Image: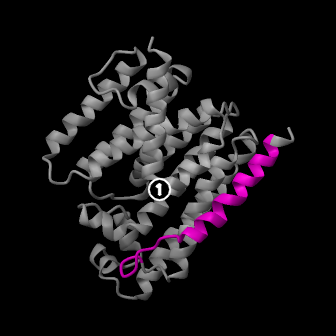
Amino acid sequence: MYPTSEINNSYNFVAKLTKSASSNFYYAFKILPREKRNAIYSGYAFCRLVDDLVDKNNNLPKKNIESQLFDIENKLNDCIEQKKHKHNGMWIALGETLRKHPQNLRHLKDVIDGCRMDLNKTKYKNFNQLTEYCKKVASSTGLAMIEVFGVKDLKAHKYATDLGIALQLTNILRDIKEDYKMGRFYLPEDELRNFNTSENEILSGEKKENVRKFMEFQAKRVRDYFISGERLFPLINKKYRFCPEIMKNIYFEILTEIEKNNFDVINKKIRLSKIQKIRIIFPSIIKSFYIGLFR
């Protein structure tokens, strides 16, 4: 058993990491009860570690990154058993979280498997293949979140999965150019053919009708996943519901911006302004505050 001071230091570490990586989510989650907040920050820190390892080390040989992913997986197992590591960092906090929510071990391992896919798979033949990827890198985090929030309704699994797919598909549409620079192109090959377009045509950034129709089709499907994912919210305790609501609203606004820009994500980087983010985050936080105040 770790001393309380070490546990608190580790929780402070993951909170600071979350704040530096995503100040929007940091402040959104900060008003959660301490135990829930610590668990969310711990999970976020882990996902950030794995994602950055794969996305920010293109200069490293693939076998080196795979070796580090294997090492992370071993540490994930060890932290539950409280095996100490030379650099504990987030691992104490993560171990504490996983002992309280053991089901999340499987979800975090899915995150590793999803990031491992980015090393070994650069293109997707069809949407079924792409969906499996989205489930691992994004839906798994949503499933971990509902474990932390104590959601028991069996339907929540499907809705959390669909919400994760919607978030990841939005990322994919927004980051086509950036992903290509890392050697990845996620849009399904069979659907490109169905719309008589191609990878090169998408990347050219030229305003063509077939490209626009293809992107419209993609965006419509993402909206359908958002609609399904929203059904998760009533199943979550009102005190915690604002967390997935904020995530959904931010990414839905990104999708809306893509549509407003006539689906041109090549010539212009789609991003939300600080004012847009505040307009999305602040009302949810205020609503949650009053719910907690008058319960």
Dot 1, crowdedness within 10 Å: few (<14), some or many (≥20)?
many
Asked where in the image residue 294 lies, by quadrant, the reply is top right
Q: Is residue 220 left or right of residue 285?
A: left
Q: Quadrant of the C terminus?
A: top right
Residue at the limit of the structure toward the left, as seen here: 61
Q: Residue at x 49, y 63 (%)?
A: 170
Q: Where is residue 154 in the image (x, y as percent from the top left)?
A: 67, 34
Q: In which quarter of the image is the N terminus?
A: top left
Instruction: Compare residues 276 and 270 and report the one nearer the observer.
Output: 276
Q: Is residue 23 left or right of residue 58?
A: right
- Residue 284 within the magenta-colored segment of the rendering: yes
- Residue 190 within the magenta-colored segment of the rendering: no
Residue at the limit of the structure toward the right, as seen here: 294
Q: In this view, does 15 lie to the left or right of 89?
A: right
Q: Please name the colour scheme applied to the rendered image.
A: one colour
Q: Where is residue 292 in the image (x, y as percent from the top left)?
A: 79, 41
Q: Which residue is drawn at 61% across and 29% down?
A: 35
Determine whether 278 is above or below 50 in the image.
below
Q: Mark 1 points at which residue?
A: 168
Q: In this view, does 78 lie to the left or right of 64?
A: right
- Residue 274 visible at all: yes
For the residue labelled by badge 1, is the local secondary structure a helix, a strand or a loop?
Answer: helix
Instruction: Compare residues 186 and 94 and report the one nearer the observer.
Output: 94
Q: Position of residue 132 (x, y in %)?
A: 42, 47
Residue segment shown in magenta: 265-292
Q: Which residue is drawn at 30% across and 82% down?
A: 204
Determine whether 79 is above or below 271 in the image.
above
Determine whether 214 is above or below 170 in the image.
below
Q: Where is residue 101 in the image (x, y as percent from the top left)?
A: 55, 24
- Residue 135 visible at all: no
Name the amino acid, label 1: Gln
